[in-house]
Image (cartoon, rainbow, N blue to C red):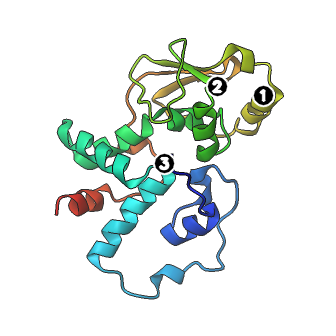
């Protein structure tokens, strides 16, 4: 399995996204605010940047990302919005949104180590896609861990999306509906990604 070792803050600055989207609580710096606006970017460059932005946020490599796009294209509705739905419904993303992990990378690692269950069964696949009605919870034996208690305490101010019915006291959440493009907390031009893959 490929491991992403890129510095998060540097990559965030390059792609023009807030570190908070990645779960890193660091204020945006004004130091290099216009660094990426110095030269004119081609249409292809804009499309590529939007694709790289989504891949980086969700920690997905090119081949699985392309696969998600193919799934999104076959679903009803706009392919760009469906792509967001596919990425947001990944188990590692749901765990991060619940506030049971400090960062998206940590969520991916904790899922890989088998700390969470879906409908009572242990799932250790970060790319597992949750469905409406699924209940995601922390394993029973991990609920007394200081690590997870501290994590919940640190993420208590994080806004849980409306499509998740989270019970932080119980270290669990249920999926009330599938996530949509309106639920995300960052800006992305998905139509540019659709144009890129439609060439």
Of marks 2 and 3, the one in the foreground = 2
Residue 12 location, x and y as percent? Answer: 56, 64
Residue 186 image label: none
Of marks 1 and 3, the one in the foreground = 3
Residue 174 location, x and y as percent? Answer: 50, 20
User: What residue did someone put label 3 on?
Assistant: 58
Query: Label 2 to label 3, Cα distance in Å?
Result: 19 Å
Residue situated in front as seen by the camera: 159 or 193: 193
Mark closest to the chain's N terminus, 2 or 3? 3
Question: Which residue is pictured at 70% across the width and 19% down the height?
Answer: 169
User: What residue did someone put label 2 on?
Assistant: 115
Question: Which residue is pictured at 16% across the width and 63% down the height?
Answer: 199
In the image, 65: left or right of 112?
A: left
Instruction: Identify the residue at the far bottom of this view.
Output: 39
Mark closest to the chain's N terminus, 1 or 2? 2
User: What residue did someone put label 1 on?
Assistant: 149
Question: Which residue is pictured at 45% across the width and 18% down the height?
Answer: 134
């Amino acid at each position: 399995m490929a491991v992403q070792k890129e510095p998060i803050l540097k990559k965030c600055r390059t792609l023009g996204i807030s570190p908070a989207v990645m779960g890193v609580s660091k204020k945006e710096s004004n130091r290099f605010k216009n660094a990426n606006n110095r030269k004119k970017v081609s249409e292809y460059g804009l499309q590529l940047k939007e694709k790289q932005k989504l891949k980086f946020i969700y920690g997905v490599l090119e081949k699985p990302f392309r696969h998600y796009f193919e799934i999104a294209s076959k679903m009803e509705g706009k392919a760009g919005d469906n792509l967001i739905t596919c990425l947001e419904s990944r188990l590692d993303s749901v765990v991060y949104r619940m506030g049971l992990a400090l960062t998206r990378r940590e969520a991916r690692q904790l899922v890989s180590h088998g700390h969470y269950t879906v409908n009572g069964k242990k799932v250790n696949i970060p790319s597992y896609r949750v469905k409406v009605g699924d209940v995601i919870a922390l394993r029973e034996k991990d609920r007394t861990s200081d690590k997870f208690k501290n994590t919940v305490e640190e993420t208590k101010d994080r806004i849980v999306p409306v499509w998740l019915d989270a019970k932080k006291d119980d270290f669990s959440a249920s999926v009330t509906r599938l996530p949509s493009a309106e639920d995300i907390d960052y800006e992305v031009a998905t139509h540019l990604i659709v144009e890129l893959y439609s060439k």
